Image: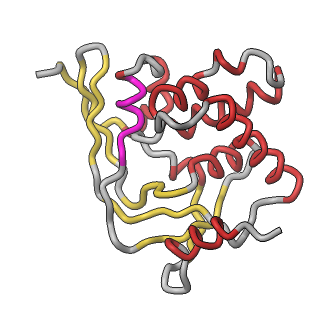
Amino acid sequence: MIDFNIIKRCLKYHSPLHPIVEYNIDDLIAPNRADVLVREEFLQHLDEFGWSNIKYTRYYDLVDQLMSSDKDPTDFSKKFANLYDRIKDQGFNKYYLITVAHTDMTHELILNNKKAYLSNDGVELRDGAHRLAVQKHLGKKKVRCYVLTNGFNPPNYTQQMINKNLFKESDLEVFKSSFNSIGNKT
């Protein structure tokens, strides 16, 4: 059966006018996109424990607290698990690539009364956080992406997660190499 929503979504971002470039997956997980790591953490939970206690995962909380209020966290988690199974069994859909866009943003994180300035020069994830998390979890090192040439102002999911107590200072270690400066909050 043809999923016309996927076709419509692909046509919105993905056209022959947008170049396709292969990126290292770790380079696409910018400091403002810790949500990708939480998604990967959820996949680890599924691999180790199945559906038991999914309500206690940070991904479940992420969906429940930060995403649209009309999304049921259990249903959304099942859809993500189905995507994971489909990619694991059938491979990554080469017609439904991850989308990135050019940016030169510097993100500010405030945690435990300290400011950290994180930069991500180059490209930022625009569409495909779940697919990127699956590829990373499956051990892939690179992923092909559509590159939008027009820049955009990406959301700072990491700060939103910090504000909701879904992300701790120790979790920032993964972004240590991205820190430009750390100082007291003013």
**Front residue (pair 48, 114):** 48
* Residue at 78% from the left image edge and 44% from the top image edge: 82
Determine if the magenta segment contains residue 81. Answer: no
Judged left or right of residue 180, residue 128 is right
Q: How is the image coloured?
A: secondary structure
* Residue at 72% from the left image edge and 70% from the top image edge: 94
Residue 9 quadrant = bottom right
Residue 41 quadrant = top right
* Screen quadrant of the C terminus: top left
**Front residue (pair 138, 58):** 58
Judged left or right of residue 70, residue 107 is left
Position above or below: 163 against 40 = above
Relative image position of residue 179 (x, y in whole percent): 34, 35
Position above or below: 23 against 31 = below
Relative image position of residue 39 (x, y in whole percent): 62, 36
Relative image position of residue 104 (x, y in whole percent): 29, 57
* Screen quadrant of the N terminus: bottom right
Magenta part of the chain: 155-162
Determine if the magenta segment contains residue 156. Answer: yes
Total count of labels: 0
Q: Residue furthest right?
A: 89
Dominant secondary structure of the residues highlighted in magenta in the image = helix
Relative image position of residue 117 (x, y in whole percent): 27, 36
Q: Residue furthest left?
A: 186
* Residue at 74% from the left image edge and 29% from the top image edge: 44
